[in-house]
Amino acid sequence: MKIRQSSFVLAAIAGVSLLAACGGSGESAGDAATAPAAEEVVLDNGMTPAEQVKAREAQFKKMGKAFKTISDQLKASEPDVAAIQAAAASVPVESAGLADWFPAGSGPESGVKTDALPAIWEQPDLFAEKIADFRAASDALATTAEGGDISAIGAAFGTTGGTCKSCHEKFREDD
Ligand code: HEC
């Protein structure tokens, strides 16, 4: 309640001073009232928490899509090896920045809806370990896919999927 009051006051002040500066442009005053500068949280990388969560979820979605493609093809009677190779190659690319997707302040404490658990910031060494396990497995999957041997690809896919799951179990909220 107190916070709301003061942000309303800040917004009102910003609106009033803008009105004075701009000779009464209603539009500018409106902008200032909806986004008072003093209220905006910016992470170390320059993104807002909402932008960061949206960006990482979009990357994870691409990884999930690639995984579905591989899984579908492995189940097909005549797997499309080229489709598997393309999807497997995309995972290390789409996840390249994973270690930087979770800057301090982009967790649930930001008020943004996210499935990232506070454990990510409480146990950074374990989180880094999960990233390293995943990276090793997904690199191996991409290399194995190049070889085109379906049963070897199946095994590498299983190992990689295990590293996704292992991180989710510890660091992502259950759906
Ligand atoms: C090092 C930890 C980690 C690894 C490895 C990992 N994830 Fe995730 N994943 C997360 C976290 C944390 C979230 C929740 C992000 C959020 O909501 O802010 C998530 C979210 C997701 C989502 C949901 C995205 C959305 O739209 O909300 C999908 C899909 C996903 N991961 C797929 C995968 C796949 C597939 C792999 C392996 C190829 C993988 N992840 C590997 C930690 C990980």
Image (tube, rainbow, N blue to C red):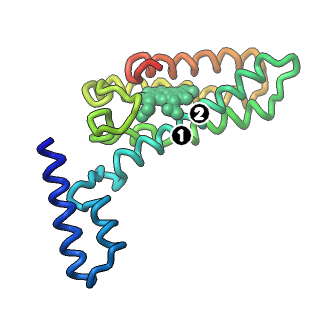
Looking at the picture, how far across and down is residue 82, in whole percent? 80, 34
Residue 1 image-quadrant placement: top left
Give the vertical position of 54 relative to 79 (above or below).
below
Q: Residue furthest right?
A: 78
Looking at the picture, how far across and down is residue 121, in whole percent? 28, 31
Give the vertical position of 9 relative to 50 (above or below).
below
> Residue under circle 1?
59
User: What is the tally of numbered marks visible in this picture?
Assistant: 2
User: In the image, is 15 to the left or to the right of 135?
Assistant: left
Q: Are marks 1 and 2 in contact (CB under 8 Å)?
A: yes
Residue 131 seen in the current view: no
Looking at the picture, how far across and down is residue 99, in whole percent? 40, 38
Give the vertical position of 54 relative to 121 (above or below).
below
Residue 71 image-quadrant placement: top right
Which residue corresponds to the image point at 38% horizontal and 23% vertical from the top-left? 171
> Residue under circle 2?
63
Label 1 vs label 2: CA separation? 6 Å
Which residue corresponds to the image point at 46% horizontal and 43% vertical from the top-left? 54
**86 and 12: which is toward the camera:** 12
Label 2 secondary element = helix
Residue 59 seen in the current view: yes
Q: Amino acid at mark 2?
A: Met
Q: Residue furthest bottom?
A: 23
